[in-house]
Image (cartoon, rainbow, N blue to C red):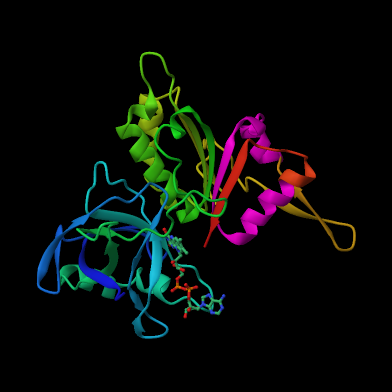
Amino acid sequence: MAEIMVPAQITSLTTLDPGEVRIIELALPKQWEVEGIEYPVYDTMRPGTAFLTKPWGTRTEKRRRRMYTRSNANVDSEHCLETIINFTHTERSDTSAWWQTDECVEWQQSAQPLDVKVEWNQDRTALQIYENSQQCHATNLRLEPDGEWESMKFLALAFSTGITPFLSYLRYMKHRNFGRSDTLSGSFLRLIVSVRSPQQLMAHDELLSLERLFPDNFQYHPVLTRNWPQDWPYTQGRIMQEKQTGMDGRAIDLSPLLAVVPDIQQYHVRFCGNKAARDQLQEGFQQYSLEPRSIRAEVW
Ligand SMILES: Cc1cc2nc3c(=O)[nH]c(=O)nc-3n(C[C@H](O)[C@H](O)[C@H](O)COP(=O)(O)OP(=O)(O)OC[C@H]3O[C@@H](n4cnc5c(N)ncnc54)[C@H](O)[C@@H]3O)c2cc1C
């Protein structure tokens, strides 16, 4: 079946750290015509999933297919996909460099469209925004079904733009009052996010105010690894570290993480970041003989 893409406009572009991190917002059409017939485009994306678009690659000088995790939620931002993109600084960097350029701003100003993938719904009566994962799995971060997450206690550990799936969780959970009712206390999510410097903090004020609004359901712990204000009340430096032992052994030091979450075994751990950090966390759990209630991790 032919792939269907719809044109999206960059409706907002916020530079958090020049050349390094930008928040992007893409607006999608609500209808789209296929073979002469107009179909509705539904926004059914589940928190924690990613959409597919075709940004420009500065290295390859062509449009590339890339996946981005949505950082907002369909419940209050229908047809508007927010994501946060960082420059990866690798030899292969292609589109991640382009998103930080003035050319990207020019695309926004001249309303140059970006294609976003959509797919047919089950009975082929409508289109829906494509999402990368349909089922919850150990290697993705699709949020558990409604009726499950409301009674779960999550530790979300995010490295840099790895915060995106958890921002989507939190915006969705806030909309659903964290699953609180007269008889139920709702879900609990403790977010630990690690970035280099204060200007790389994403949605910082929003997260602080969410914590004030829902103190029994949400706790926010932003870690700064390179520079921090003198009075920074959270972790300063890495939340976990690799240490060489002997000639070729390595040990993982989880003590900064365990200082923040001493009862980590009580949590459903969710991780988003790079592969090296994911491996360190898993090795650390093994070395400390720690078994959280469940672990799911997505790496890019
Ligand atoms: C599910 C998912 C969600 C994501 N969400 C986000 C997000 O929210 N924010 C964000 O900043 N990034 C996200 N990413 C990462 C993003 O899609 C890009 O991969 C990243 O921004 C780097 O893009 P790039 O084009 O600069 O380089 P790359 O994607 O690293 O690719 C550069 C070049 O290397 C090639 N290449 C890639 N891997 C290999 C390999 N193993 N061997 C040989 N060639 C290779 C590619 O084809 C390309 O030509 C996500 C990725 C996935 C899979």
Residue 259 appears in the figure? yes
The relative height of residue 103 versus residue 21 in the rendered view (above or below) is: below
Nearer the observer, 137 or 86: 137
Q: Residue at x 37, y 77 (%)?
A: 64
The answer to whether 109 appears left or right of 194 in the picture is: left
**In this rendering, would 52 be left or right of 200?**
left
**SS majority, magenta:** helix
Decide if residue 146 is on the left or right side of residue 25: right
Counting the numbered discs, the total is 0
Q: Residue at x 49, y 54 (%)?
A: 160
Q: Nearer the viewer, residue 99 or 196?
A: 99
Residue 280 colored magenta?
yes
Check residue 136 for magenta coloring.
Answer: no
Q: Residue furthest top?
A: 182
Q: Residue at x 45, y 55 (%)?
A: 161
The magenta segment is 255-284
Q: Quadrant of the N terminus?
A: bottom left
Q: Position of residue 33 (x, y in %)?
A: 13, 68
Which residue is most to the bottom?
Answer: 61
Residue pushed farthest front? Answer: 123
Residue 253 seen in the figure = no
The image shows residue 73 at horizontal and vertical percentages of 31, 45
Q: Can you name the residue that lies furthest to the right here?
A: 246
The residue at the point 34 percent across, 33 percent down is 174
Residue 108 is situated, as x and y percent measured from the top left of the image, at: 20, 68
Query: Residue 14 versus residue 48: which sits nearer the camera?
Result: 48
